Image (spheres, rainbow, N blue to C red):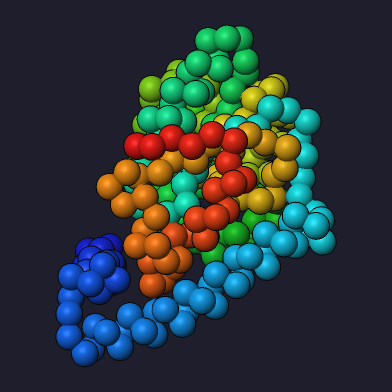
Amino acid sequence: MPNQSHERLEQRLLKVISKQTRGKGAACLRGFLKVLSWIFGIVVQIRLFLYKHRIIRANTLGCQVISVGNVTVGGTGKTPIVETFARSLQQKGRKVAILSRGYKSRKTPLWEKILKKEKQLPRVVSDGKRLLLNSDLAGDEPYMLASNLPNVVVLVDKDRVKSGKYAIRKFGCDTLVLDDGFQYLKLQQRFDIVLVDYTNPFGYNRVLPRGLLREPKRNLKRAGFIFIT
């Protein structure tokens, strides 16, 4: 039920920001969301500035890192592209790990995190030989990737620096593919691939929450390659 309520709320908000819902109430809400978008956009650009000028230090893992992401919320077909790149790299002799944050996977309860003294390790969906987690624990997309790529390591953790180090140390990986990694600035020296949905490429041309952009579209200049999906 909570998921259904959340989805209904998302659909209502989408109708408001796309102007499908009209009236004074919807117009006032769009005005309020516009103010929030202005604030959000400033925060995003400040964060980029801090990383760009090394006020906040990013990490280097000493291996090839490829990020596949987008500039809008919602699906743009990232998973098939991640799968294609990972398979191609693996077939060329690379030891590949896919690093996912595990969207819609089961979260570890707070009490469990507090009680555990040791630092929690990334969840290993696949060790490159066999599936180790089901879709509830891994998340639908990491599970699908692990199922389709039997020779590729698939890890789930919000901290992609931690999971990247683990992939290198535990499995000897020399190539990391970040699923949904364009906004993940903690890892530097990587190649960014960005997917753009041709039906609504720039999310109503406004950043969240007035539009669907995660960051201003001018930031696409960070990308090394752009796919239209």
In this view of the protein, can residue 9 be seen by the observer? no
Q: In the image, 73: left or right of 174? A: left
Query: Which residue is depicted at the point 62% across and 45% down?
Result: 222
Q: Quadrant of residue 190?
A: top right
User: In the image, residue 33 lies at what x, y percent?
Assistant: 39, 79
Q: In the image, 175: left or right of 18? A: right
Query: Which residue is depicted at the point 44% across and 40% down?
Result: 195
In this view of the protein, can residue 160 be seen by the observer? yes
User: In the image, residue 76 lies at what x, y percent?
Assistant: 36, 43
Residue lying furthest top? 92
Q: In the image, 113: left or right of 203? A: right
User: In the image, residue 74 lies at what x, y percent?
Assistant: 36, 52
* Viewer-proximal residue among 88 and 120: 88
Query: Which residue is depicted at the point 75% across and 55% down?
Result: 52
User: In the image, residue 80 lies at what x, y percent?
Assistant: 38, 30
Total tally of numbered discs in the picture? 0
Q: In the image, 137: left or right of 174? A: left
Query: Which residue is depicted at the point 77% across and 45% down?
Result: 59
Quadrant where the C terminus sits is: top left
Q: Quadrant of residue 192?
A: top right
Quadrant where the N terminus sits is: bottom left
> Quick check: 57 above or below 2?
above
> Quick check: 115 above or below 36?
above
